[in-house]
Structure formats: structure tokens, C-alpha cells
Image (tube, rainbow, N blue to C red):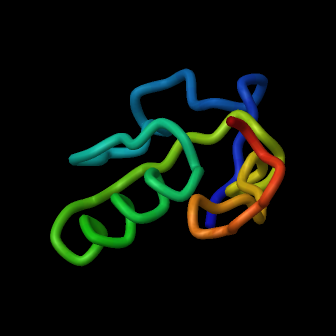
Amino acid sequence: MVRASLSNLATSSEDRIMTDVVIIGGGIAGMSACAQLAPYVKVVLLEAEPDLCYHSSGRSAATYIEDYGN
């Protein structure tokens, strides 16, 4: 994995990354899309947070919470 910040992004044409697909967001959906496409095309995944899946949590619709909601 290559990490880059806005301050060190390529500025000359010789340093640009050539890609077929750009995925914005390294959450569960972005990571899944990247994993599915990677065997077939060149994929770049852009994420603003310092870690992938940063805002993912253990909450799930499959979790029963008796006093949650109506």
C-alpha cells in the first residue's frame, strides 16, 4: 500500500500514477469494491482518514438491543 498526503502528491506528469479506477473512501464498501476490481484493473483507493475502515464500528442490524428505538 502506498500512503500519500495532499502535500506530497505528484505534480509533474512523470510522477503521476496511471490507473483505470479511482475509489473514494476506504470503508467497508470502498474496500470491497477495490478487492473485487483489483484482479482486473489498476485501482487507486483514496482515504482521508489515517487508517482504513476508520469509522466502521461493531454495530450491526443483526444485534438485538431490547430498549433501542420504539
Q: Residue furthest left?
A: 40
**Residue toward you, 28 or 46:** 28
Q: Nearer the viewer, residue 17 or 21?
A: 21
For the N terminus, give its image quadrant.
bottom right
Decide: is 62 above or below 65: below
Residue 24 is left or right of residue 69, and the answer is left
Compare residues 56 and 5 and report the one nearer the observer.
56
Give me the residue at 72% from left, 38% from top.
69
21 horizontally vs 69: left or right: left
Q: Position of residue 62 (x, y in %)?
A: 58, 69
Residue 42: quadrant of the picture: bottom left
Residue in the image at 24% along x and 77% along y? 39
Disc tally is 0
Dividing the picture into quadrants, the one containing residue 11 is top right
Residue at 77% across / 65% down in the picture? Answer: 58
Q: Is residue 3 above or below residue 5?
A: below
Quarter of the view holding residue 65: bottom right
Report the residue at 75% width, 34% height from top. 5
Quadrant showing the C terminus: top right
Of residues 52 and 42, the one nearer the viewer is 52
In this rendering, is residue 51 above or below 5? below
State the image coordinates of residue 25 (x, y, percent, origin top left): 54, 40
Q: Is residue 64 above or below residue 15?
A: below
Residue 4 % position (x, y): 70, 43
